[in-house]
Image (spheres, grey):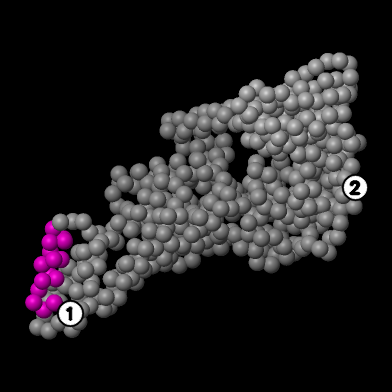
Amino acid sequence: MKFLTRLRKLALLLAATGWAATAFSAPQYTDKENALNLAEALDKGIYRNNLITSTFIQSVGKGRYFIKVILDNGAEHNWDLRQVRARSKNESLVLRKNQALLFPSEDSNDFAILAKSAFSRTALRAKVYTKRFGDSDVLAGQEINFGIHRFNLVDLLRLKPGRDEQGYPHHYVLDLENGQRELLSYLDAYHAMARKALIADPASVTPVLRSPYRIRSVKPIALGEMGPTGTGSFGVEMTFDRAVALQPGHFPFRFRENGNGKSGAHPRFVVEITAPNAVMEQSVGKIETLEFLRNIHVVSDSENPVRLLLRAAISPEVMNFPPQVEVLGSTVLVSFKKVVDQSVFDQQELAKQDLLLRQDRLLHRELSPEEVRTRNVYEERLREGDTLVHQARKATPFAKRFSLLSKAAGAYQEAAANSSTDGLLAEALRKRNVVMVKMPVLVITHAEHALRQRSLRDPGELRRLLEEAALLTRDKQLLQTIRRLLTHPKL
């Protein structure tokens, strides 16, 4: 518990210092070309009910410039880029021709301009909105096409506007046909126009979601037969009222602390799979226990009324790999891997692995699609290596066994190259090292046995194996033994 408490404090500190480092990450001044373009954009605009009659740029040296603004009341202002950015967010600046000044990135002084009238015309004609989920959403980077019911304004609906992730206030409302409501800022509107997310012809895109999926049941899928490598699968089926026209990537997972841990005990954690465009109109039974999952149940997302969450209590050290999702008609199957690593017997090593896994779960509670892909490759290569090692134990002749072990070492090497944490890297390299240490010893044992026979079936093949074994080790005693065997009269 003390370790977890310290780790939480460290995470909070990093988050706080990280924010402080990026809050003003863009330079205070800008280059000459950008300054000239910005001055042109500001000219004849409005600042706090006063007309901007003239704009100039002024240098502070070393190619850095700020904007000088003269108002119709005679007041003069010197604005650096941080001040201009702040005024674009608090909307004390209004550009001519019904345009809005925006800074799309906190890391750059490059600016953009939204033609608000053009956006409104496009939104009013649009029948489909392609929503791209932002970085703060568990669905970050994913896109879904939604049918549009009506375009409106935040002020007209007397809604609390809120702000987007960059701090720009919301102005527009898209009420979607599935009952979902999207609030857009000027920056959101600019991005929507840039990526052509407002579509007038619904036949030009597919699928278009017009109503939410209604969940009907949640059923367990029992653990399958454990393979030779100690790995098996089990899962949970979510069945909906109709075929699901979404991709597996639309059902991401996150791993988080649920805040219900008892004092003095290990805190409880949950794994949570998100189901977008889904609602629960009637109670759905829960699953008490399924392998390392407990209290598996479905709840509505409190932050999004058209989204469900499949939750289960879990210990952070037991889920080595992310759950896999398959969309099969009206069923969404979430599969989990159960791994029994019988190669770790030493208790001290086991405790070390446990610590690394706990750190991984705390620091990687949400995985991006790329991280999930990398972990999938890692798991596949690790499983491939385990299977090859298992096949090698039974293989004859010896040359085939050696070849299988060599391929296993390569699979473990590739797994290591796709590792995303220290723990996963160590596990893959440990397995690779075990194989590579064994291979020269096995070749020497095989060669000594073969050379004791009255006749040697394939001297060339044995020499090749010994030469390959020599490349796998730096152990002086083993190398000396291999050299001695290579000078044997039968070779």
Q: Position of residue 268 (x, y in %)?
A: 52, 40
Residue 281 drawn in magenta: no
User: Taken as a whole, is the magenta stretch helix, strand or loop?
Assistant: helix
Q: Position of residue 278 (x, y in %)?
A: 73, 53
Instruction: Give the residue type at disc 2.
Output: Arg
Q: Quadrant of the image for the N terminus? A: top left
Q: Position of residue 230 (x, y in %)?
A: 40, 62
The residue located at (52%, 36%) in the rendering is: 261
Q: What's the magenta region?
A: 477-491
Q: Crowding at label 1, few (<14), some or many (≥20) Cα neighbours within 10 Å? A: some
Label at residue 459: 1
Q: Crowding at label 2, few (<14), some or many (≥20) Cα neighbours within 10 Å? A: few
Residue bearing mark 2: 121
Q: Quadrant of the image for the C terminus? A: bottom left
Instruction: Please tell me whether mark 2 sits on a helix, a strand or a loop.
Output: helix
Q: Is residue 279 visible?
A: no
